[in-house]
Amino acid sequence: MSKAVSHFDERLNKLLKAAFEEDLGEGDHSTLALIPASTKGKAVLKIKQDGILAGVEIAEKIFRFREPGIIFHLNKKDGETMQAGDKAFTVEASVHTILTCERLVLNCMQRMSGIATLTHEYVEAIRGYSSKILDTRKTTPGFRLLEKEAVCIGGGMNHRLGLFDMMMLKDNHIDYCGGIGRALDKAYEYAQKYKPTLKIEIEARSLEDVQEVLASGKANRILLDNFDPPRLREALTLIQKKIETEASGGINLTNIREYAATGVDYISVGALIHQARSLDLSLKAV
């Protein structure tokens, strides 16, 4: 197992522990009252809405978190197209495990499938262009790990997982610090001292800002925020691919192809997560 996978599983286990503590509390009294602890059962995940499936691997991990010895039959994989009437998986386990995990599995898969489906729409909208679709930190507290995983399943890319894995100097950072030049100087000095591999991204709000960023030479990526396509083209002409470029602000499915046509490296879209609608799935006893 790679370090990246191991770290993901570690974070997932923390998420699942908190989720079960929230939902289970002192115990699942409905199940305890009706079903003997030794009873075994089978359930199937039924798909009731078209889209991109996401969260199947997470569902298996949820069941195994409660009962390592479950039998999990996979019918469809993460990232595959799903249609109403399809079946994603069948699980064989203790009935207590199935009933205790049911809502958490559905909550995760419905949310993740909605995000993956919307992300897929954005990715398809710019097919043929080189720009990559990025998510943002506009996520649900405590659920970011799985929301960002769903973006990847849908064909997008993660911008950063949190404040810790990239320096991103936005308008408020710049204004509080006293300007672009000062902000980049201090960020670069900090990175060299504490973490030289840390990339620095900085927001530009005008063409003058772009020129100042380029003159500094201390940024790895420039965020061109709220630039319309014509002004974005002007900025890209100035930049000449000297550093990575990212467009954001006011970008949606109706205009994203115009932005991709400029040749910008990345397009970040917060809506991938905060505007996604959960898809309809159900877990039924067999």
Image (cartoon, rainbow, N blue to C red):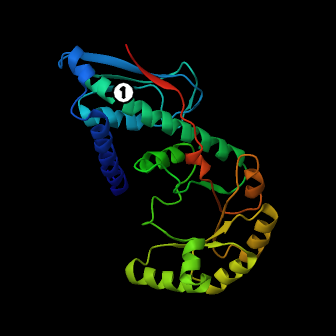
Classify residue 89 by image quadrant: top left
Work out whether residue 24 can be spotted.
yes
Above-or-below relation of 66 to 232: above
Identify residue type, mark 1. Glu
Above-or-below relation of 80 to 160: above
Q: Where, quadrant-wise, is the C terminus in this rendering?
A: top left
Q: Is residue 136 left or right of residue 44?
A: right
- Given the current orientation, which residue lies at the most extreme right position? 230
| Residue at which label 1 appears | 102
* Residue 180 or residue 124, whichever sits in front: 180
Report the residue at 76% width, 66% height from top.
232
- x and y percentages locating residue 96 in the rendered image: 25, 23
* Residue 58 or residue 167, whichever sits in front: 167
Q: Is residue 200 left or right of residue 264?
A: left
Report the residue at 57% width, 49% height from top.
156
- x and y percentages locating residue 79 in the rendered image: 53, 37
